Every structure is written in structure tokens, then in C-alpha cells.
Amino acid sequence: MKDEHLLDGEFLKAIRVLAPGTVLREGLENILNARTGALIVIGDSPQVLEVIDGGFEINADLTPANIYELAKMDGAIVLNSEAKKVLFANTQLIPDPAIPSMETGIRHRTAERVARQTGALVISISQRRNIITLYKGSGKYVLRDIGVILTKANQAVQTLEKYKVVLDKSLATLSTLEFQDLVTLYDVAKAIQRTEMVVRIVKEIETYVSELGTEGRLVSMQMEELIANVEDDGLLIIEDYYLHGDKSPEEVLHTIGQWDSEDLLDLSLICRALGYTGSASILDESVSPRGYRILYKIPRLPWPVIKNLVDTFGSLQRILNASIEELDEVEGIGEVRAKAIKEGLKRYRDQVLLDKYHW
């Protein structure tokens, strides 16, 4: 079962439903403080209704007060799928006993089985241990103290800042080498590796932000400022160097994203994901970019025009060496835009070379 920092999209959505600042979270905090315990199902699908037995129908708007009062009774509480209404209270949940469960307490075992059987989000509040545990499908997540999460989130943001500096250096080096036509697969793989490392830290921070709710706005703003264009750059690098074209850049990046940390450290594996084959010396192989990423840096240059340029010339070096007249002949490019492209490439090359001496 999932019980980790990096959660999938479905679980992140589930956590947001009961993040601090929500009506449901306030009610859960009241239950925690009173140490009454609770079993709450969020969902009104036929599969959920099948496991409900007895109790009584409420069909009232959810408030912190009513969920707290209803939790004083022994049975489970069932909310609608938006967690806005209380549908049933004091009901018994009867999931299939054949569904495996690693939990020991009756409340948590029932919660796990209902989640597995129905796919609904099930919340179990332990009366004895005073913690909130979430179950959804085969996933499990224990909500932590807000102060602890905030500390971890701030530490993760500091780590992200450091990794972003390393990534920026790697991208600046790659840009310099691309202009000089001196790129090796090592440089490409290193930039993709750094991008994926940043993306992984971002996913961890997103989990914290989801748990923090309204308390996580500042962390979210810091993160958004740091990661502008990070994933776009990663996709454009793949667009520049991917050999086969049978997968989209998004699919290649997703494949790399599924690797464990050990595989991610192996740069030759990244080269193979890009379609290159060979021995350990594969990293020394010279490669030339198509030019997507560098052209994307030119202001107000639409993506269809970038594609036409790459389709026409085939590589960044040919684009750099093309005359204004040759650029003018490409579909979607007039004389004015051709001059803007030449000027934009020159300006960006000067900026890259200048920045190189500042790192």
C-alpha cells in the first residue's frame, strides 16, 4: 500500500478535500480533540451503497458541528462524493471479508477493505492513537501534524532552490555547447537528469501543499516562482535529441519519471531512453540539437514557426548559419520576422556566453 510522500494525482485530490481551511477538516479536528474516533466514507456510488447496512438517512449539509456530533455514535458516516452533504450516519459497513488487510484494529481494517472494494476515500480516526488515516483504493496515507508538515515543506523548498541552481548551470552549459556545436550525450543526459530531480522535489512539495491547505499558500507561491519553465525545458531537450519519434517527449519524460533513484543516476539509461544504443562510451558521443529549445527562447516566436524552421533546416547549426533570405523563405516567416530571429539568436547567444562567466 502507498504510505509515502510522493502520492499519485487521485490521492492528492483526496487530501485536498480535507486540507486545513475546509469544513471537513475542522470537523475532523473536533473529533480528534474529543478523542471519540470515527469512520467516514466519502462517496455515493452504487459500490458504496452496497456495503452500507442499517443506520439512518441524514441528507443534510456538512458542518463541523454535525459531523462531530454524529461521530459520537458507533456507526460510520457516509458523505456524498463532493464531501458537502452528510448522507447516512450510525451505519454499519460490511465489506467483503475475503479482501486482504494488514490492519489490526477493526475500524482501520473495515476502512481499508471498503476503500479497496469501492475505490472511495475512507477516513479512519483512531480513538486510542488520535491520528487520521486515509484509505483510497489500495492506498493508505497518515495525516501528519501541520507544524511538522510546514517544517518539512520549507526544508523541501530550500532543497528545491539548491537543485534549481544546479539545473540552471547545467542548462546554461548545454546552451553554450549547443551554440558551439560541441554537445555530447553526457551533457544532454545530465540536463534531463537534473530536470527530473527538480520535478521529483516539486511532487513532494505538492503533497505537502495539499495537506497544508490554506496554510500552504506561501510555500506554493515560492515553489511556483522557482519552477517556471522547468518541465518545458526538459520536454524541449527531449524534442531536440530524441532519435526515434515513436513516443512523444511527454511519454519519454514520464518513463524516466517512473524510474527509481538508482536508475536515474545512470546517465547511459537516459541515453537509451532517448533511443541511443552502445557501450559505456555512449556518453562521449557527439550530438547536435534540432534547435527547438534555443528557438523557444526567442520572444514572440510561435510554436508552428519554430516547427517549420526545424523541419526546413533540420538542426540548430543550419538555422544559425542561415541567411535572412533563407529564413524568409520558410513558411510563416517574412523579412521582419527573419531579422527578428537572427537578432534573437544573437542576443541569446551573447547572454548565454556572458552568463557562463557569472556561474
Image: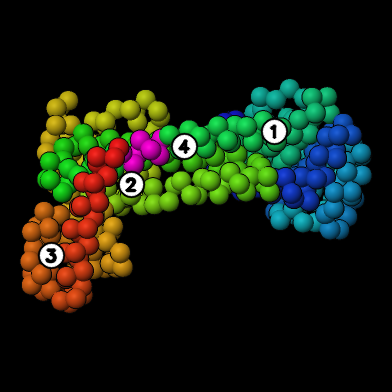
- Amino acid type shown at disc 1: Gly
Is 105 colored magenta in this rendering?
no
Q: Which residues are magenta?
A: 163-169
Q: Position of residue 327 (x, y in %)?
A: 12, 69
Q: Quadrant of the C terminus?
A: top left
Q: Residues within 10 Å of mark 4 (few under 14, many from 20)?
A: many
**Residue at the spot of label 1:** 147
Q: Mark 4 and 3 residues: CB-CB less than 8 Å, in contact?
A: no
Determine whether the residue tagged by mark 1 lies in a helix, strand or loop. helix
Residue occupying image coordinates x 52% and y 37%: 157
Q: CA distance from mark 4 to mark 1?
A: 20 Å
Using the rendered view, name the quadrant where residue 108 is placed: top right
Earlier-in-chain disc, 4 versus 1: 1
- Amino acid type shown at disc 3: Thr
Mark identifier at residue 234: 2
98 left or right, relative to 125: left
**Residue at the spot of label 4:** 160
Q: Nearer the viewer, mark 4 or mark 3?
A: 4
Determine whether the residue tagged by mark 4 lies in a helix, strand or loop. helix
Determine whether the residue tagged by mark 3 lies in a helix, strand or loop. helix
Q: Is residue 129 above or below residue 33?
A: above
